[in-house]
């Protein structure tokens, strides 16, 4: 029996191009495509795919939310995140949500098909560069929720006073949060911390 694949991506050219390429591969059958997470959820029960390819950055439901919802419907759902984004936070959140593999869209067709077959067989496939970024993430102390709120406003260019007003805390509390963030990141200053946050994907640039 061929491996039944569903593709979820908000770019039509990507969806149709993948469907065309994968449909030519022996042992693979594309049973459906969806332009977003909500449509994928509506189709999932009827199509019952063996493996689902999911894009990361989609609206209104992103790839991580989609994976969580698919696996809530079926804990055995096997999902591959296929994306152009490779920040360590995206990788961590995607795998934490239940993705069995995390691939970049520059992956070759042969490697993509081999990953689909491996995931269908119950394996997890994490390419070495992705595993390295995940290890980097795991080695960095986690920020608290309030520190993360502070970091987002810091990256937006707000002063400690402005951050305090936004979060309804004292300026001294903000300074303490910023000091903790710098220590956890090993950052020299606020600008360095902001650069690290953007690089890691903890805060997204507009």
Image (spheres, rainbow, N blue to C red):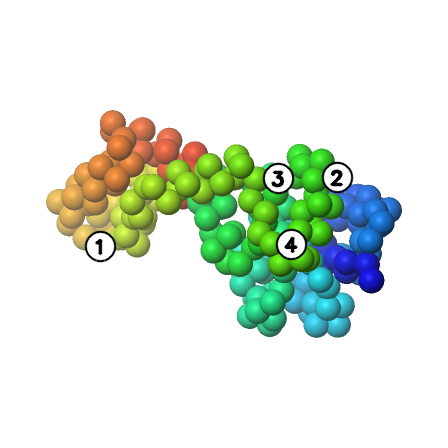
Foreground mark, 2 or 4, reads 4
The residue that appears at 77% across and 60% down in the rendered structure is 4
Residue 133 can be seen in this image = yes
- The residue singled out by tag 3 in the image is 104
Rounded to the nearest angstrom, the CA distance separating label 3 from label 4 is: 16 Å
Foreground mark, 1 or 3, reads 3
Whole-percent x, y for residue 18 in the image: 77, 46
The mark nearer the N terminus, 2 or 3, is 3
Whole-percent x, y for residue 148 in the image: 32, 48
Whole-percent x, y for residue 204 in the image: 45, 41
Determine whether, in the image, residue 203 is placed left or right of residue 111: left
The mark nearer the N terminus, 1 or 3, is 3
How many dots with numbers?
Answer: 4
- The residue singled out by tag 4 in the image is 119
Q: Quadrant of residue 185?
A: top left
- The residue singled out by tag 2 in the image is 109
Rounded to the nearest angstrom, the CA distance separating label 4 from label 1 is: 47 Å
Kind of element beneath mark 1? loop
Determine whether, in the image, residue 67 is placed left or right of residue 153: right
């Amino acid at each position: 029996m061929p491996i039944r694949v569903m593709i979820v991506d908000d770019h039509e050219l990507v969806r149709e191009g993948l469907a065309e390429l994968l449909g030519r591969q022996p042992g693979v059958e594309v049973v459906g495509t969806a332009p977003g997470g909500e449509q994928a959820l509506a189709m999932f029960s009827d199509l019952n795919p063996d493996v689902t390819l999911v894009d990361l950055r989609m609206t209104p439901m992103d790839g991580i939310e989609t994976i969580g919802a698919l696996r809530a419907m079926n804990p055995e759902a096997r999902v591959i995140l296929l994306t152009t984004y490779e920040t360590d936070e995206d990788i961590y959140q995607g795998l934490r949500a239940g993705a069995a593999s995390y691939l970049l869209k520059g992956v070759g067709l042969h490697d993509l098909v081999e990953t689909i077959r491996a995931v269908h067989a119950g394996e997890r496939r994490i390419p070495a560069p992705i595993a390295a970024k995940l290890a980097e993430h795991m080695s960095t102390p986690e920020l608290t929720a309030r520190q993360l709120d502070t970091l987002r406003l810091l990256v937006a260019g707000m002063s400690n006073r402005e951050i305090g007003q936004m979060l309804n805390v004292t300026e001294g509390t903000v300074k303490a949060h910023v000091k903790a963030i710098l220590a956890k990141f090993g950052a020299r200053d606020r600008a360095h911390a902001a650069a690290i946050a953007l690089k890691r994907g903890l805060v997204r640039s507009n």
